Amino acid sequence: MKECPECKIPWEEEENIYDYFRNQGESKEKAAETAEMYGCTKETPKHFGVNVVGIEDPTIYDGVSYWECQSCKQRFDRWTMKKVQYETHL
């Protein structure tokens, strides 16, 4: 997802990962090499995430099970992107 289904805030940085490393002063070759480690190529550009956090629940899956928007605090199922209700234990 490129944005929150609820509040529509972006979940991806605008610049792709290659451009990020170029803007950090890396050479074209080094930026391409580093970006490729993130799966970012000319054919498959990728972006760093922003405004979203992956939530892991080891009782469900060994990896991200939910995405939580840092703007509206809504949580979504990773696979269906449907809103989920959750309890906080504060």
Image: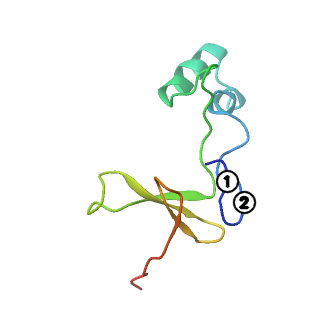
For mark 2, give the secondary structure.
loop
Q: From this view, report whether residue 83 is shown above or below residue 17.
A: below
Please indicate whether residue 42 sits to the left or right of residue 68 in the image: right
Indicate the amino acid at tag 1: Glu
Q: Nearer the viewer, residue 34 or 15?
A: 15
Farthest-out residue, left: 59
Q: In which quadrant of the rendered view does residue 44 lie?
A: top right
Q: Nearer the viewer, residue 59 or 16?
A: 59
Farthest-out residue, bottom: 90
Residues at badges 1 and 2 in contact (C-beta under 8 Å)? Answer: yes
Q: Residue at x 68, y 26 (%)?
A: 22
Q: Residue at x 59, y 47 (%)?
A: 49
Q: Label 1 to label 2, Cα distance in Å?
A: 5 Å
Expressed as whole percent of the image width and height from the top left, the position of residue 59 reads: 26, 63
Q: Nearer the viewer, residue 67 or 19?
A: 67
Indicate the amino acid at tag 2: Lys
Expressed as whole percent of the image width and height from the top left, the position of residue 24 reads: 67, 32
Q: Residue at x 29, y 52 (%)?
A: 62
Badge 1 density bin: few <14, some 14–19, many ≥20, Cα 10 Å: some
| Quarter that holds the C terminus | bottom left
Expressed as whole percent of the image width and height from the top left, the position of residue 27 reads: 65, 17
State the mark number for residue 81. none
For mark 1, give the secondary structure.
loop
Q: Nearer the viewer, residue 30 or 63?
A: 63
Residue of label 2: 8
Residue of label 1: 3
For marks 1 and 2 on the same chain, the one whose residue lies earlier in the sequence = 1
